[in-house]
C-alpha cells in the first residue's frame, strides 16, 4: 500500500501545531519534518540550544495530531550555500556534523527511520567539491546506519547534483547512498522523464509535486512528471511518497494553491495506485 506523507513546510503561514493538525485533517498519517534554518516551526538552532525541550515538544505535537514522521529533512543554512556539506572550511563541516548528529537524535527519539540532507554546492574546485561531498555523504550514511536510520541526499537546482549526470557521479562515489528524489528539479531544466527514471532505483524517499520545463512547481493539471511510471517502478523505495508543494517566492513557488493542489495530487496518486493494483 502506498504510504503518503506531506511536508509540514507546505503551509508555512501556519504555526507548528496548526500545520500538523491540518495534515491530519487531510487524512495523512505521516509528516515530513523540515528541520530548516528558514522554518520557524522546526529550527535546527532550537534543537541545538535545548535538545530535550525541542524533542519533547515535537513529540507532543505529533501525538496530538496523531501523525508519525516520514522523514526529517535537514537544511542547516538559510540557503544551500551556507554551511554546505562540502564547505571547503573544515570548521564549517565539523559544525555541520554536530548538527547532523543532533538531527539523528531527533530521529531516534521520534522513531523516524529516514533522514534527508543536501549534497553540497559548487565552490572553487569541481574535483575537490565532489571529493568533499562524497566524504561527507559517506560519513552521514555510516553514522545514520549506526542509528538505524536511512540517509539520503536530495539533488536540487544549484547543488553539486544539479542534473542526472552529476547525481550519478556522486552516487558512484558513495556505495549505498540513496536519494530523496524530486523529479521537479530535473524536469524544470528540460531533462526527460526517461533520463530521471534512471535515478529511481536509488530512491529511498520521494518528493512529489507538479512541475514542467521552466516551471519548478505547477498545478497538478500542468505537470509533465510521469507519475504512472514512478509508482509502477518504485518497489525498491523503502520510504514514503511525500507531497511537497512549497510556498516561497523562489522560482515563483508561491503561485500555486497549495491546499487544493495537495488534495488533487493525493487523489491522483491514490487513483493511479488503485488502477495499478487492478491490472497486477
Image (cartoon, grey):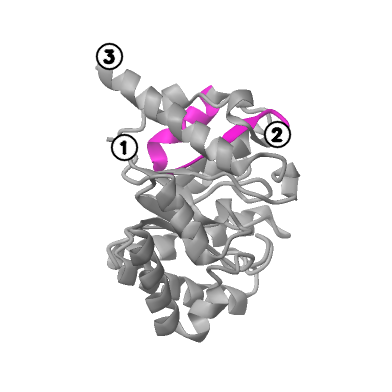
Residue 236 image label = 1
Q: Is residue 55 magenta?
A: no
Circle 3 sits on which residue?
279
Q: Quadrant of residue 80?
A: bottom right
> Is label 3 in a helix, a strand or a loop?
helix
Which of the two marks, 1 or 3, is nearer to us in this view?
3
Say which label, 2 or 1, has the lower sequence index: 2
Residue 51: where, in percent of width, then height? 43, 82
> Is label 2 in a helix, a strand or a loop?
strand
Asked if residue 245 is positioned above or below residue 15 in the image, the reply reads above
Q: Categorize mark 3 by other alpha carbons within 10 Å: few (<14), some (14-19), many (20+).
A: few
Q: Quadrant of residue 236?
A: top left
Q: Categorize mark 2 by other alpha carbons within 10 Å: few (<14), some (14-19), many (20+).
A: some
- How far apart are labels 2 and 1 at the CA level? 28 Å
Residue 232 visible, this orientation: no
- The residues colored magenta run 194-215
Which of the two marks, 2 or 1, is nearer to us in this view?
2
> Is label 1 in a helix, a strand or a loop?
loop
Circle 2 sits on which residue?
215
Q: Quadrant of the image for the N terminus?
A: top left
- How far apart are labels 2 and 3 at the CA level? 33 Å
Asked if residue 155 is positioned above or below residue 47 in the image, the reply reads above
Nearer to me, 67 or 117: 67
Amino acid at each position: 500500500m502506498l504510504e503518503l506523507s506531506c511536508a509540514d513546510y507546505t503551509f508555512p503561514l501556519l504555526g507548528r501545531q496548526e500545520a500538523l493538525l491540518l495534515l491530519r485533517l487531510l487524512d495523512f498519517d505521516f509528516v515530513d519534518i523540515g528541520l530548516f534554518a528558514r522554518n520557524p516551526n522546526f529550527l535546527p538552532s532550537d534543537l541545538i540550544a535545548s535538545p530535550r525541550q525541542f524533542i519533547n515538544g515535537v513529540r507532543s505535537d505529533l501525538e496530538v495530531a496523531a501523525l508519525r514522521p516520514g522523514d526529517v529533512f535537514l537544511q542547516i543554512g538559510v540557503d544551500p550555500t551556507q554551511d554546505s556539506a562540502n564547505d571547503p572550511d573544515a570548521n564549517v563541516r565539523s559544525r555541520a556534523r554536530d548538527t547532523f548528529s543532533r538531527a539523528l537524535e531527533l530521529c531516534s527519539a521520534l522513531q523516524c527511520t529516514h533522514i534527508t540532507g543536501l549534497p553540497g554546492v559548487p565552490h572553487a574546485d569541481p574535483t575537490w567539491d565532489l571529493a568533499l561531498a562524497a566524504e561527507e555523504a559517506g560519513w552521514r550514511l555510516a553514522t545514520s546506519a549506526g542509528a538505524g536510520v536511512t540517509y539520503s541526499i536530495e539533488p536540487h537546482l544549484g547543488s553539486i547534483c544539479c542534473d542526472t549526470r552529476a547525481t550519478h557521479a556522486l552516487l558512484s562515489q558513495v556505495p549505498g547512498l540513496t536519494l530523496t528524489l524530486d523529479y521537479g528539479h530535473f524536469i524544470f531544466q528540460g531533462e526527460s522523464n526517461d533520463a530521471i527514471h534512471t535515478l529511481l532505483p536509488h530512491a529511498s524517499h520521494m518528493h512529489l509535486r507538479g512541475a514542467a520545463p521552466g516551471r519548478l512547481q505547477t498545478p497538478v493539471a500542468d505537470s509533465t512528471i510521469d507519475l504512472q511510471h514512478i509508482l509502477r517502478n518504485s518497489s525498491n523505495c523503502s520510504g514514503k511518497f511525500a507531497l511537497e508543494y512549497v510556498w516561497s517566492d523562489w522560482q515563483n513557488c508561491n503561485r500555486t494553491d497549495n491546499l487544493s493542489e495537495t488534495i488533487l495530487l493525493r487523489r491522483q496518486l491514490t487513483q493511479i495506485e488503485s488502477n495499478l493494483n487492478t491490472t497486477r
